[in-house]
Image (cartoon, rainbow, N blue to C red):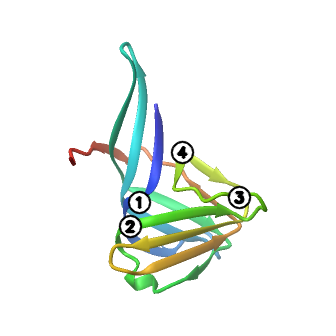
């Protein structure tokens, strides 16, 4: 099973300091837009849905934007590594570990934009995270 987290359509419930580490920021997703691929007897299947809750941790992070307004559904997101040949990424495979400097720019449906610059980042779903299939047309 492989879960791919997309920034577009994910929902943010909070942006806050990490309780355990100074300079760390948590981006809490109440619903992470996920595409789940599974291999079974009939072959490979893909389902779209939401994984919740998810917490993304950004080390040595700097935030730019109106943090209090950066809640709810995301319209667009772009992740760029701080290397010369880095391309924008609209998704990451879970669990996600990035040991490079990065910039994540998120645009919300309410018009707000949040930029997170960090030295590293990670998102490891916990046992509490549950996948719900999307029945959207």
Mark 1 or mark 3, earlier in chain: 1
Furthest residue to the top?
Answer: 41
What is the spatial separation of the Cα atoms under label 4 and label 2, in whole angstroms? 19 Å
Tell me which numbered mark, 3 or 4, is placed earlier along the sequence: 3
Q: For mark 2, does the 10 Å Cα neighbourhood hold few (<14), some (14 to 19), or many (20 or more) residues?
A: some
Numbered mark located on residue 94 in the image: none
Asked if disc 1 and disc 2 are in contact, CB closer than 8 Å, the reply is yes
Task: Determine whether the residue tagged by mark 3 lies in a helix, strand or loop.
Answer: loop
| Nearer to us: label 3 or label 4 | 3
- Left of 76 or right of it: where is 18? right
Residue at which label 3 appears: 86
Disc 3 from disc 2: Cα separation: 22 Å
> Label 1 neighbourhood size at 10 Å, few (<14), some (14-19), many (20+)?
many
Residue 34 % position (x, y): 40, 47
Residue occupying image coordinates x 22% and y 48%: 136
Looking at marks 1 and 2 on the same chain, the residue that comes earlier in the sequence is marked by 1
Contact, CB < 8 Å: mark 3 with mark 2? Answer: no
Disc 2, SS: strand
Q: Is residue 114 above or below residue 120?
A: below
- At 39% from the left and 73% from the top, the residue drawn is 108
Give 20 or 121, whichever is nearer the viewer. 121
Dot label at residue 8: 1
What residue is disc 4 on?
93
Query: What residue is shown at x 66% (from left), y 70% (from top)?
Result: 118
Q: Dot 4 lies on which element?
A: strand
CA gap, disc 3 and disc 4: 17 Å
From what the image shows, is residue 133 above or below residue 43?
A: below
């Amino acid at each position: 099973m492989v879960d791919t987290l997309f920034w577009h359509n994910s929902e943010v419930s909070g942006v806050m300091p990490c309780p355990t580490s100074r300079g760390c920021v948590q981006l809490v997703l109440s619903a992470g837009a996920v595409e789940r691929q599974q291999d079974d007897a009939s072959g490979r299947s893909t389902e779209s849905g939401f994984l919740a809750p998810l917490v993304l941790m950004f080390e040595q992070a700097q935030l730019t934007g109106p943090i209090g307004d950066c809640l709810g559904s995301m319209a667009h997101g772009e992740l760029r590594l701080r290397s010369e040949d880095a391309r924008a990424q609209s998704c990451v495979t879970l669990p996600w570990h990035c040991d490079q400097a990065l910039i994540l720019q998120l645009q919300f449906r309410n018009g707000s934009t949040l930029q997170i610059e960090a030295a590293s980042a990670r998102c490891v779903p916990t046992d509490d995270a549950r996948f719900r299939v999307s029945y959207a047309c």
